[in-house]
Image: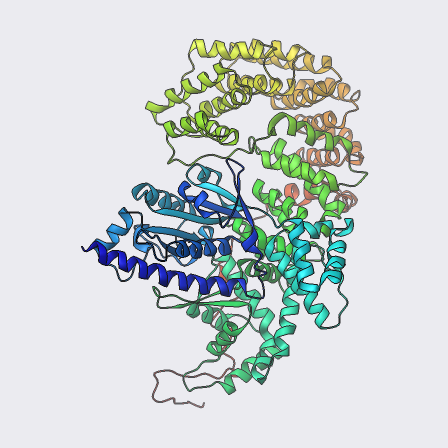
Amino acid sequence: MDKKVVENKIRRSVKQVHDRNQKRLDKKTTSFISLRIQYNLSIRNQKTNEEFQISDIENYMDESPVALIGGPGAGKSTLLLKMAVQLSEKNLDNCAAMIPIYVQCGLLSSYDRLEDEIHLSGYSEEEKKYLWENGKLCLLFDGINEAVNVEMGKLLRDVVNLSEEYPECRYVINCRAIEFPIWASYYFEPYSILPVKDEQIRTQFCKEFGDVTGEKYYTELINSSHNYLFELCKNPLLLSLVIRIISQSMDSIEEFSFSRIKGKGDIYREFCRSLIQHELKKIKRERESYFEIIRDRLFTTLAYYMQANNKVYISREEMEVVIRNMPYGKGRETDYIKFISSSSSGEKSLWYREIAEDVIKSSFFNLHLLETKESVYISFIHQSFQEFYAGKYMAGNNTVHDKKYVEYLLTMHNRRNWDSIEFSCSLDSTNTIIKYVMIYAIINEDTDALILFAKCIDGNESLKNNCAIVEDCCIWLLDAFKYWNVAYKYELIYAAEKLLSYVGTDFPERLIEDVKYFSDKYAGEYLLTEYPESMDFSQLKQVIIEDNDSAKMNAIYTLGKRKWARQDVEVVRDYLFTLIAECIADQKEQAVKALKNLIENNTSLNINDNMYQTLINIVKNKNETARTRTYTLNILAEIGKPNAINVLMDYLKDKTNPYRDSASWSLQELVLHVKKNESSQEYIRDFYYTCLINESDDQTGMYSKGNLVYTLSKLESGRLINPIKEWLSTQKEAYVQEDGINAIGCLGGINEVDYLIPFTRSEDPVIRAKAYKGLVDIGYELSESELERIKNDRYSIVNIIIMKYIKRNEADENKLELKELMNLSEDNNKSEIFSQNYENVNNVVNYNC
C-alpha cells in the first residue's frame, strides 16, 4: 500500500464529505422550520458541568465517544452536521485529516458487524484497515434512538466496541434525552444541548419582526399568563414554528394572539395550518388542489403507521402499499382518487403511485436518495411532525372514541411513543385519550403508563388547569407507589410532587402530605438506573471510586439489582459491607438498600454471623440516619432469620425510632415467611394490636398505625376485627382510616356491610374507594343507586371500582395486528371507481354474465 496515495485519497474524501455535508447543513438551516439559531447553542458536559460552543469542537472531541443529548427539536442533528462540516474545514489541506462519516441510524440495516455498515467507497480493504487503525475516521451517528432494524442498546454497545477496537478514531452520537439510557453515560461522554437563552429569543423576535413589533411580541410572550409558552420557545424548533405562525398571521392580515396556543400540540397544529395555507397560494395545477381533499387523512395515517412500526423513514414502496390499502371515505376522497385515476400520466402509472408522488412533493416530507440502498426513503420534515400527525390520527373523529389506538402504542412499552400520545391528548378537547392512558395504567398496573399520564398533564396548559384530572393522577401515583408492588419506583413520587402545584384548593391536604412524606423517605435526590450487564464488577467498582455522585449511586444500585455468578456474588456482598463500614452517608444508605436487593436477587447468598450482627447494630444505633436504619430493617426481613423478630419488635415498641411503619412492614414480612406454630402467630397478632393501640399520634405514629392495621389484615387476624373496629372509631387521621377500612374489607365477611357502608360517604376519596372495594371483596351486591353514585364520583379511584373489580373477570380483547387495527386492506379499494392499470399483461378479457 502506497501511503502517499492513501493520504491524497483522504484529502479528496474530506473535500467531498465537506461539500456534501455543507449542502445538507445549508438545506437544514435554511428550511422554513429553521432559524439557524442552532449555530449559537451551547452544550454542557453532564459530568463536569463545563459549557462549550459547538465551535469549540477540539475541547471535547478527545473524550470520544461523545453523546449529544436533547429533546425533540433541540438541534441534535443540526449540531452533528455542523460538527462534521467544522471537522472537515479544519482538515481540508491536512494530510493527517480525519474523514467525518455521517450515519443516519434510522436507515441502518441489520448487520453482523457495525464496521461493515461504515461505507468507505473508493478504498481497498487494505486502505480501509489503515483508516481504522490510524484514526482517520470520525463517525457521527445521527438519531441512534431512531434505529429500527437494530436494537438501540445493541447499537450503543457496538459503537463502544468500535471505539475500543479502534481507539484512535472518533465517535459521536446523538440521542433523544428520554431514550438515552443512563447506563450509557459510563461509556459515552454525555453533553446536554442547552435551551435557547432568553436574550436569543428576544433577538430573534426583533430580527424577524423589527425592533418595535419584536419587542411587543417578546413582552407578551414572557408575561405570566403565557409563561408556559415562553418555556416552550426555549426549544429552537418550537421557537421557529411560533415565529412562522406569527409571520403567516401577519401576511394574512390576521390578528395573532398567544392565547391561541395552550401547549405544544397547538404550536404544531397552528404551524401546519399556516404551512398548508402557504402551499395553497402557490397552487397552479388542478391536481394539487385536489390533493387537499385527502391530505390530512393521508398524513395522519402514514404517521400512525410509521410510529406504530417504530419507523422514522419509510421506503417509497411501503408507503405506496399503505396508500393503496388505507380506507377512503365515500365522498370527496373517492372523487380525488377517481380524478387521479383518470388523469394519470403514463400508461404504467397507478393511482396510488401518483398520490405517493404528491406526498413527496409536499413541504411536509423529505426525500432520501441513498447510495447504499436501492430504494428511495421518505421521512417527515422532522420526527416531531410524524409524532404530531400520529397523535392527530388517534384524536381524529373516527378514532378518538376507540381506546385500541392508544393502547396499541402503550403495549409497545416504548417511550419513543410518548410524544405521540402527548400530542393526541393535547389535540383531544374531550379529554377522552388522557383517560384511556389513565385506565390502561390502572387496569394493567403499569407504572410507566402512569408516569406518562402525569407527563401528558405537565406538558399541556389546559390539562394542568383541569383540577379533576390532575388530582386523579396524583392519587393514582400515590396509590401505585404504596400498593402496586414495584419497589423504589422514584419516578412515581417525583411525578406526583410535580403535579401538587396544580391540584385544587379542596384537594385533601392529607394526600399532599402523604406524597411529601414518601418523597422524603424513599426518593431522596437520586433517580436510580441500572447499568447494563456488560459492566462487570471491576468497572462498577471503578465508577464508585472515581465518578460523580449520581454515577456512584447508579453503580451501587446495580450491584444489588443483578443476579451474579456464584463466584462473584460473595465478592459483591463483601464490597457492599465495605461501603457500609466507610460510613459515607449517601453511599452507606445506598449500599444498605443495594444489599437488600442483592439478597433478594441471589437467594443462595449467605450472610454470616458477623455481617448479620453488623446489620443488627445499625438498627439499634440511633446515631445512624433514619433511611439507613429503615433500609436495614428491610434487609433483616429479607434474610428471614427468626432471631430478628425480637429486634424488630423492640424497634417498633420504641416511639423515639423513625419510620416505624417500615419496622411494621419488615416484621410482617418476617413473620409471614418464618414457619411458626399458631400460638406464636397469635402472640405476634396480639403484639401488633398492642402496638397499634399504643402508637403515638405524631406523624411517624400515624404512618405506623396505618401499616400496623394493614399488617393485621395480612396476618389474618379475624378474631381481632371487633377490637380493630372499636379502635378505628377513635382514629381521625384519613391515612389511618384508609388502611383500617382496607383491613376490615380483608378480614370481615358479609356481616361487615353495615360497618363499611357509612365510609362510602367519606369526604376522603381514597377512603370511599377502599370502602367500596371492601364491599365488593366480601361479596356485597351493589345496588343500582350505589353503582350510579360510584359512576358519578368526582374521583376515578372511586369510579374505577366498577371497571377494575366488578368487571375484572371480563376477558379483554386480544391485541389486533396493526394492519387490522388501521383497516389497511387490499380489499378496501376494489370499487369500480378505481381505474386499474395492468402491468405485464398483453390482453385483458371481460367476461359478461
Residue 567 coordinates in the image, percent (x, y): 32, 23
Position of the C terminus, as image quadrant, is bottom left
Please determine whether, in this image, residue 344 is positioned above or below residue 706: below
Residue 499 coordinates in the image, percent (x, y): 70, 40
Horizontal side, residue 653 vs residue 842: left or right: right
Residue that appears at 67% across and 49% down: 198
Residue 543 in view in this figure: yes
- The one of 620 and 244 positioned closer to us in this rendering: 244
Residue that appears at 56% across and 59% down: 36
Residue that appears at 45% across and 62% down: 22
Residue 372 coordinates in the image, percent (x, y): 34, 64
> Residue 703 sits in which quadrant?
top right
> Residue 49 sits in which quadrant?
top right
- The one of 508 and 849 positioned closer to us in this rendering: 508
Please determine whether, in this image, residue 317 is positioned above or below residue 563: below
Please determine whether, in this image, residue 27 is positioned above or below residue 226: below
How is the structure coloured here?
Answer: rainbow
Horizontal side, residue 688 vs residue 563: left or right: right
Q: Residue furthest left?
A: 1
Residue that appears at 51% across and 74% down: 361
Position of the N terminus, as image quadrant, is bottom left
> Residue 764 sits in which quadrant?
top right
**Tally of numbered tags:** 0
Residue 177 coordinates in the image, percent (x, y): 53, 46
Horizontal side, residue 811 vs residue 700: left or right: left
Q: Residue furthest front?
A: 93
- The one of 228 and 127 positioned closer to us in this rendering: 127
Horizontal side, residue 305 vs residue 740: left or right: left
Residue 270 in view in this figure: no
